[in-house]
Image (tube, coloured by chain):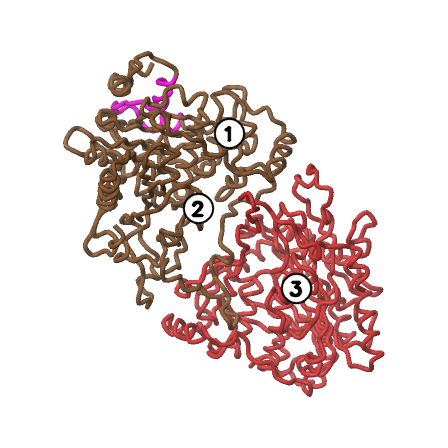
Chain colours: A brown, B red
Amino acid sequence: MNSIHHPHHLHATNFHNHNHQINKNRVRMVDAYQDVKTSKTNRLGETLSNLLNIQKPYQKINPTPSTHSNWNVLNIHEDKANTPTMSPKEDISDRWRDIHGVQEWEGLLDPLHSLLRREIIKYGEFAQATYDALDFDSFSDYCGSCMYNSHKLFDKLGLSKSGYKVTKYIYAMSHIDMPQWLERSRLTYTWSKDSNWIGFMAVSDDEESRRIGRRDIVVSWRGTVTPSEWYENMQKKLEPIGYKDSKVEHGFLSIYTSKSDSTRYNKSSASEQVMKELKRLVDFYKTKGEEVSLTITGHSLGGALALLNAYESATNFPRLLISVISFAAPRVGNIAFRDELYQMGIKILRITVKQDLVPQMPGIVLNESLQKFNDFTGTLEWIYTHVGAELKLDVRSSPYLKRGFNFIGIHMLETYLHLVDGFVSTGSTFRSNAKRDVALVNKGSDMLIDELRIPTCWYQLAHKGLERNSYGRWERPKRDPEDIPSPIREEHKS
Amino acid sequence: MNSIHHPHHLHATNFHNHNHQINKNRVRMVDAYQDVKTSKTNRLGETLSNLLNIQKPYQKINPTPSTHSNWNVLNIHEDKANTPTMSPKEDISDRWRDIHGVQEWEGLLDPLHSLLRREIIKYGEFAQATYDALDFDSFSDYCGSCMYNSHKLFDKLGLSKSGYKVTKYIYAMSHIDMPQWLERSRLTYTWSKDSNWIGFMAVSDDEESRRIGRRDIVVSWRGTVTPSEWYENMQKKLEPIGYKDSKVEHGFLSIYTSKSDSTRYNKSSASEQVMKELKRLVDFYKTKGEEVSLTITGHSLGGALALLNAYESATNFPRLLISVISFAAPRVGNIAFRDELYQMGIKILRITVKQDLVPQMPGIVLNESLQKFNDFTGTLEWIYTHVGAELKLDVRSSPYLKRGFNFIGIHMLETYLHLVDGFVSTGSTFRSNAKRDVALVNKGSDMLIDELRIPTCWYQLAHKGLERNSYGRWERPKRDPEDIPSPIREEHKS
């Protein structure tokens, strides 16, 4: 079916595919929602009615794979209370190329190979870290920064056993109007009005490198937190990238490449920061004779940035093995962009959830409350396309999740990681020996069934960070000096 | 003006008023909104349009007393950062009867006497404690209970220097449908499905008793937290109390007097629990030859319960000096009830905020969102009346508070305490040497101006009480056994 509509696609997917059989896996690589249409008749009335279908995912379609009764779920949940939250990491040194996607993940996705599942979750937790450590207190001096110094980040987030070390923080121009108090305040120091912490780079340590068979460099991109960012992201305008016909969405590219001498953190762009650090790391490990891979991850907007980052990295480091593991990423570019990514040998695994609307973007835009859908103004040409293999999840597969449509909850990365952890194969029930802590799903949402008795949106600081001083007054404590962002320190590190 | 409409009132206020002059203070004792009308024509159309006037309190009326610029406010705020949050307590042993209201607080309210202000805040913080310590996590085993054992309560809330010791917790039938999970859960122990922690009793220690000139027993009543409770409170039905013509609102009386043998905590009613403990304490201190007073406090619904409690206490302990310090209390009973309270010698100080709608209830009821107003069904007879002296505050007097109507924020007790702290006299500016921590206002609301950079609704537990176990799983920790409510322990204590 897809081959009829998208001749380019087959070409592209075959570019690095040594097995030319049309198999189930390859079909899954194609986004089911990827309807490339340039006709003006494809107005939003149609899109909206498609959406309405998507909005009722629980109407039957397939008999829901969940056959657990809530009672069983609770038993299983309680039995796991005193068990580790992760499958042990196994030695993948002799299989890492397959897991890295050199074979386009053929035969590994459905059923999902347990070694691949474990790696997907590892990278997903790097992406999650960019949310968990963000200071989003608009009254904070450091709003939009990471709360912790880079050498503390993983410890603070319980990722000390990840096997990776953070080497660099990435900043992007925020494009967000800051609250007016900043303008009027008499603060002598504000970390930055123009920049946001947008991610980090990390590299596998010796032990992890032995386990995974190579030195792995990670770039983890933060997604959007506030609705206003979504608006900006969806500029609905394609612009060229590179020297060929590739075009990508203007908003994404702008975040990736913007810089300004008047800023403290974006005298160089996110793109330039990453390229510089990547060169340093690649040179360093190559001179040591090590095999090096690059894995780029991100959720939502972060998944879009990951794709731009992969494109640029492949351009600059043609022989580097590059994979993208993205979660809930929207469409980013046109067909030429997709084809160029394939031709450069970039391996892309898109994790999507069937009921999530963001991977269907651009195509819809959300109003401020992020609960209703507005149609576009009508100028959009439907030339955005997805790229890569797809691991497609279904919220209905989990007996832990509420039934009912919850845009934010379904889109959130913790929901994705939960579903990856439980995914066995299309149509099968949730993996009974899934170990990941189910409570994490509700960190920032209301997705878990009430029987589990996990509070909703529970990931929060005590008293929003206020502490009592010696007089009993509630104050925002001074940030540990080493956790205060510093452009000089960032510069010296690399 | 009031004497024309309410002949009963003058009779009542004069009952214990040795000074028969009509003075400014006495006029303030009368509630400006107390329009006693039984006419059926007083329909809600009228009420609603009155409300609409009240909803626009910032339209001018008086020139706003706030003349501070925000800049000055910030300077003052910063200067106070390293100062105590309270005025020191002074010795009031020779003036305590006046402060307790024996003279109906004549000449003490406008301007507000500093000694009285300090005492009002002391009692207000006891009322606030009933909110701060409530477990309102609907997934908790102990939802609706106090999070801490009674001997820890004040320490946990930073009230260790209050000079009082908690002697007893009070429970009331909750009348609230509990979430369904409780019914279905396999918990072997739930603290109570029927009861809520509704307040506590405390008694002044020796040092405080010396300072205030007598042994002071306090009953502090908790108000409502959830909108659903408001609905129940406002049953719009008067029923008799006592043996005369006094009638009070059905819902309040029901909370105060309900009991059931099938419950664990309300085999006796809140009323009976308090009366038993009160008898024990009064007997104990009377036999020691001490002078004893009773001060009953509460906010909102708690203020209504305080009045019922005062009525009953005066009936049972006719010679006890009884005061009520209520905050934001609604109307409770009819004119006969008011007159009986006066005749029994109960001294009542109602703290109200001009823009707060709750003291104008019954008369309006709020819809579920608590943001819009619905009219009554029309059966209400307007026979509810306020009672006692009134200290009337104005949100516009504080330069720290946002302009704009915020029903919840204006009604909250912390807003009241802030305004009491800053009140000098009607029409004067906010007290420049007010010491109370302004940040407290935003504990559960969004009332403070942005320039102060205090987060909104910041009073919250880290991770809503979840903690990581040794495996890294997020769990609700077991409650400290001594903090688990126990009917047996409650019984043994008194």
Q: Which residue is mark 3?
A: B153
- Quote the CA–CA distance across marks 2 and 3: 37 Å
Mark 2 residue crowding within 10 angstroms, few (<14) / some (14–19) / many (20+): few
Residue that mark 2 sits on: A160
Circle 1/circle 3 CB separation < 8 Å? no
Query: What residue appears at the point 53 percent right and 53 percent down from the top-left corner?
Result: B462
Give the amino acid type for the residue marked by disc 2 in the picture: Ser
Kind of residue indicated by mark 1: Gly
Q: Secondary structure at mark 2?
A: loop
Residue sitting nearer the eye, A76 or B103: A76
User: Of the residues tagged 2 and 3, which is closer to the observer?
Assistant: 2
Q: Position of residue B35 (x, y in %)?
A: 64, 65
Q: Which residue is mark 1?
A: A422
Q: Quadrant of the N terminus of chain A?
A: top left
Find residue B475 and report its horizontal and vertical position in percent: 58, 45
Instruction: Report whether A330 appears left or right of B97.
Output: left
- Which segment is the magenta one? A25-50
